[in-house]
Image (cartoon, grey):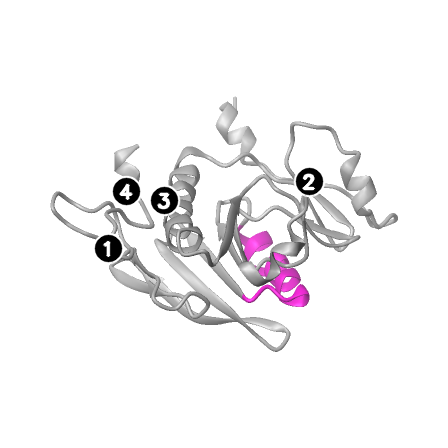
């Protein structure tokens, strides 16, 4: 018998081979579940686990302090619809919209590509995030993508080069992440800092990837 959290990890994909769904169809989906729409293909996204949420909170705190405290723009986390087109609606784990483009932020969603998207990978989303959504983000002009791999303990930074989000650098545990989009921001890709240790998050304590043993 499967445990509840194991069931939650099984992503469901809907057959849209006949009908290409639209944002209007997407909005009619049952409330309480998290969906994404890519090229008219509707997918239910499983609820994130606790470790995913720990990473998300750490990264959001870093981005909030670096971006919003400096008046560079606004940072949001999922669930929040990002409407890229009538057939492409996604919910990134984290996103940043630069102050020059705050007009794309509407009351109920974001209408257009964020400047930065952060996706935290899980067993059920690796191909979806690394391949499918990456292509869509590039197509619509997301300038920078971070792919956080909790199992591999890496963060890949990709930047928009023409019509492709090309790998800029893959940062493993123990290295310092630098963002071309956010000059001066540095992030320590490591396990939890020990007593008296500072990570390289602009002088703040903490790290991008907490240690699973601390659950």
**Residue with the mark numbered 1:** 203
User: Which residue is the site of mark 3?
Assistant: 58
Residue 188, image x, y percentages: 28, 57
Mark 4 vs mark 3, CA separation in Å:
12 Å
| Other-residue count near label 4 (Cα within 10 Å), few / some / many at <14 / 14–19 / ≥20 | some
Kindly identify which residue carries mark 2: 108
Tag 2 secondary structure: loop
* 186 sits left or right of 81 in the view: left
For this rendering, which residue is in front, 29 or 8? 29
- Specify which label sits upstream in the sequence, 2 or 4: 2
Please tell me which of labels 4 and 1 falls first in the chain. 1
Quadrant in which the C terminus is drawn: top left
Q: Residues within 10 Å of mark 1 (few under 14, many from 20)?
A: few
Which residue is outermost to the left? Answer: 196
Q: Which residues are magenta?
A: 126-143
Position of 121 compared to 19: left or right?
Answer: left
What residue does disc 4 label?
211
Q: Position of residue 14 (x, y in %)?
A: 74, 41
Mark before the other along the chain sequence, 1 or 2: 2
Which numbered disc, 4 or 3, marks the residue that appears first in the sequence?
3
């Amino acid at each position: 018998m499967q445990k509840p959290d194991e069931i939650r990890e099984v992503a469901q994909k809907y057959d849209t081979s006949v009908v290409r769904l639209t944002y209007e169809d997407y909005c009619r989906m049952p409330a309480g579940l998290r969906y994404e729409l890519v090229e008219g293909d509707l997918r239910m996204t499983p609820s994130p686990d606790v470790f995913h949420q720990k990473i998300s909170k750490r990264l959001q705190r870093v981005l909030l302090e670096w971006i919003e405290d400096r008046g560079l723009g606004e940072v949001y986390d999922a669930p929040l619809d990002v409407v890229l087109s009538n057939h492409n609606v996604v919910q990134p784990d984290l996103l940043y919209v630069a102050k020059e483009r705050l007009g794309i932020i509407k009351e109920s969603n974001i209408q257009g590509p964020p400047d930065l998207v952060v996706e935290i990978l899980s067993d059920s989303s690796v191909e979806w995030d690394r391949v499918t959504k990456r292509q869509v983000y590039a197509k619509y002009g997301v300038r920078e993508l971070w792919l956080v791999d909790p199992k591999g303990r890496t963060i890949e930074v990709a930047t928009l080069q023409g019509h492709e989000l090309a790998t800029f650098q893959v940062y493993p545990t123990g290295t310092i992440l630098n963002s071309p989009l956010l000059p001066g921001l540095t992030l320590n890709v490591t396990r939890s800092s020990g007593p008296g240790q500072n990570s390289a998050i602009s002088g703040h304590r903490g790290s991008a990837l907490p240690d699973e043993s601390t659950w």
